[in-house]
Image (cartoon, coloured by chain):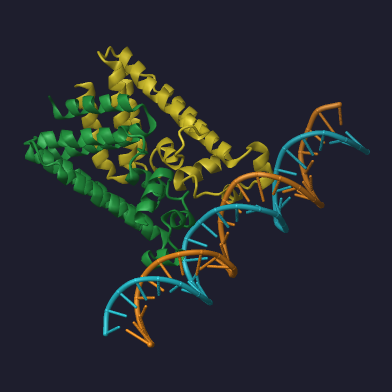
Chain colours: A yellow, B green, C cyan, D orange
Amino acid sequence: MLETATRLFYGEGVHTVGIDRIIAEAGVAKATFYNHFPSKDDLVRAYIVEQSTLQRGLAESVREGSPRQRLEAIFAFMCDFGAGLTFRGCPFVNTAAEYPDPSHPVRKAIEAHRRWNRDLYRDLLTAAGHPDPARTADVLMLIRDGLVVGFDLDDPATVKAAVEEALLRVLGP
Amino acid sequence: MLETATRLFYGEGVHTVGIDRIIAEAGVAKATFYNHFPSKDDLVRAYIVEQSTLQRGLAESVREGSPRQRLEAIFAFMCDFGAGLTFRGCPFVNTAAEYPDPSHPVRKAIEAHRRWNRDLYRDLLTAAGHPDPARTADVLMLIRDGLVVGFDLDDPATVKAAVEEALLRVLGP
DNA sequence: ACGATACCAGACAGACCTGTCTACTCTTCT
DNA sequence: AGAAGAGTAGACAGGTCTGTCTGGTATCGT
């Protein structure tokens, strides 16, 4: 059920996909859905939280190599994933675009994920002995966001090369 | 009329704002609207095209200084604009998130703007005598996209510092 | 065996969506 | 003066949206 919602929300957007479509494709009755989720916004929030835990799991599964190598592996993985045909940008960025109010629970969940992401970069940079981990983590966030937007809207090969170049410039050789 | 649509589309999203609200706030009859625009999608496309010409005009108004200084002025302007209270991300990125189909006219208009933007960076880098203008323009697109997303979702002061750091790393001192 | 629980299918309410249409008013040009 | 064009207000059709509610069914633990 959440799986179907994830596929549809990510692939077509949150507002364009209705409850009827989700329950139809999930093979679930409407009453069942509303027994599990109080409202559609709760489903959207669950979708965001699930994507966040999924990405955290992926990041933690990258355990081999030095911190610097792990950072590079994370970005390389994002590039590989972004070059896939199903890629349609970052679920957090795309969903935030549909929720203008920053105090909305969905936006709060997105904010929490971004905080984790920034902290992940900072911790890896700190472990790598980087002289300015905090600010460099912010720069990596820039590159990350540019990556997900670029792979969605521009030529994948071009974006991949740009990301590698940017990492080289920011992290040094 | 387009002005009202721009304000609402940018501020609240395309799908959440209906025709009724646009004509009500613009003080225009529905028949009048449909005399000017065949459909809502045409209005969205007009919104995108207008934003594109607006940004082109702004970029061309930055004429003083060396190419390098003009590039920095453009990014500084984006930072100033992004720190404003009305900022809600990039209209192109946000709208693209609501139009999954890349062959849709709205997406085509967004694609055209992004091509212009990349070419602007490349031409300025070429004029500045940069050794690799094409790839560096792609890197600047990464930073640009990271900038607009970051100013929308993160702390403005942090993003501003990150952008300045990133430009320093990418363009050199 | 039996009650509780969870499921399904689907009708329904009330609101909102886009887009069309009618009827009327005002301006402008000839 | 009179026709044409463009605006206004608003009803209307046909569809979709979220969320509730009614029946009927199946699967449990006891």
- Looking at the figure, which quarter contains the N terminus of chain A? top right
B85 or A55: nearer the viewer: B85
Task: Using residue B167 as the reference point, say whether residue A139 is left or right of it.
Answer: right
Q: Residue shown at 33%/41% (left/top)?
A: B90
Q: Residue shown at 37%/55% (left/top)?
A: B44
Measuring from the top left, give residue C27's x and y in whole percent: 34, 71
Identify the image quadrant of residue C13.
Answer: bottom right
Measuring from the top left, give residue C17's x and y in whole percent: 51, 56
C12 or A92: nearer the viewer: C12
Q: In this rendering, is residue B29 above or below A96?
A: below
Q: How many marks?
A: 0
Q: Residue shown at 38%/40% (left/top)?
A: A89
Measuring from the top left, give residue A28's x and y in whole percent: 65, 46
Q: In this rendering, is residue A111 above or below B53?
A: above
Measuring from the top left, give residue A26's x and y in whole percent: 60, 46
- Looking at the figure, which quarter contains the C terminus of chain A? top left
C7 or B169: nearer the viewer: B169
